[in-house]
Image: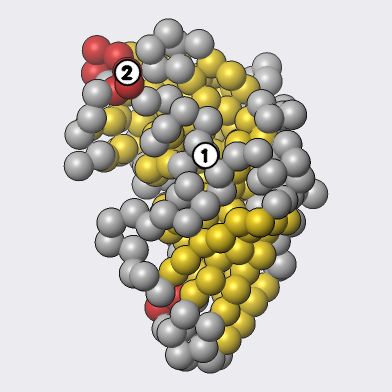
Amino acid sequence: QVQLVQSGSELKKPGASVKVSCKASGYTFTNYAMNWVRQAPGQGLEWMGWINTNTGNPTYARGFTGRFVFSLDTSVSTAYLQISSLMAEDTAVYYCARERAPYSSSFDWGQGTLLTVSS
Amino acid sequence: QSVLTQPHSASGTPGQRVTISCSGSSSNIGSNTVNWYQKFPGTAPKLLIFGNNQRPSGVPDRFSGSKSGTSASLAITGLQSEDEADYYCAVWDDSLSGVVFGGGTKLTVL
């Protein structure tokens, strides 16, 4: 069965960087796009963008350019989200989500990674 | 301000039927399939309905989805206390070239 296992909670200081991992199993990693979704405290789900797991080409949603980087290590079926120059507003739960079909917005989800940015 | 509009809240008593709406536009709901997610606090979203009206295996048939024009709806029949959760619609938007989520609806079982 499809499983997406994310790395654990992170506590970071403003200005630092963080790298969240998402290890996939139960399917051929390069056959399905990987998306990233954020949920800030008390807010709804926000799509951050996706990465083509076949080519490695990332696409970022508006508001997630510059400090956000999606990457892959296909040898270990793992996707990464790196956020630099962290700010308090980056405090949120970050989810990786496998897209079940192209441009379908139909996702299988990782368990989420809580990122807290605080001095 | 979400591209997709959902009511902030909905409620019903056990056994009732409730519906949650999701209103969009021609560039999203009007031209692509809608998905619905159920989310409990502290847990990941769960796919409830995909392709407008398809249920993944394991999802009870009390949950159903429909779409008409630029709007979609999620219906829950035989409401149960365990259905108390947040519900989100999601769809691909051709104009934005990305996925858009509704703002979410908090369902309360009275």
Residue of label 2:
A30
Q: Residue at x 52, y 45 (%)?
A: A93
Between residues B20 and A17, which one lies in front from this camera angle?
B20
Query: Residue A20: in sight, yes or no?
Result: no
Query: Residue B2: in sight, yes or no?
Result: yes
| Numbered disc 1: secondary structure | loop
Task: Give how far apart the Cα atoms at labels 2 and 1 are.
Answer: 18 Å
Q: Could you say where residue A73 lies in the image, as x and y percent from the top left? A: 33, 14
Q: Could you say where residue A115 lies in the image, as x and y percent from the top left? A: 51, 41
Mark 2 or mark 1: name the one nearer the start of the chain: 2
Between residues B52 and A65, which one lies in front from this camera angle?
B52
Residue furthest front in the image:
B68
Pointer 2: residues within 10 angstroms few (<14), some, or many (20+)? some
Query: Which subunit holds the residue at mark 1?
Result: A
Pointer 1: residues within 10 angstroms few (<14), some, or many (20+)? many
Query: Which subunit holds the residue at mark 2?
Result: A
Image quarter of residue A107: top left
Picture disc at residue A105: 1
Q: Residue at x 61, y 82 (%)?
A: B11
Looking at the rendered structure, the kind of residue marked 1 is Ser
Image quadrant in which the C terminus of chain A is located: top right
Image quarter of residue A30: top left
Q: Is residue A13 left or right of residue B62?
A: right
Between residues B35 and A12, which one lies in front from this camera angle?
B35
Picture disc at residue A17: none
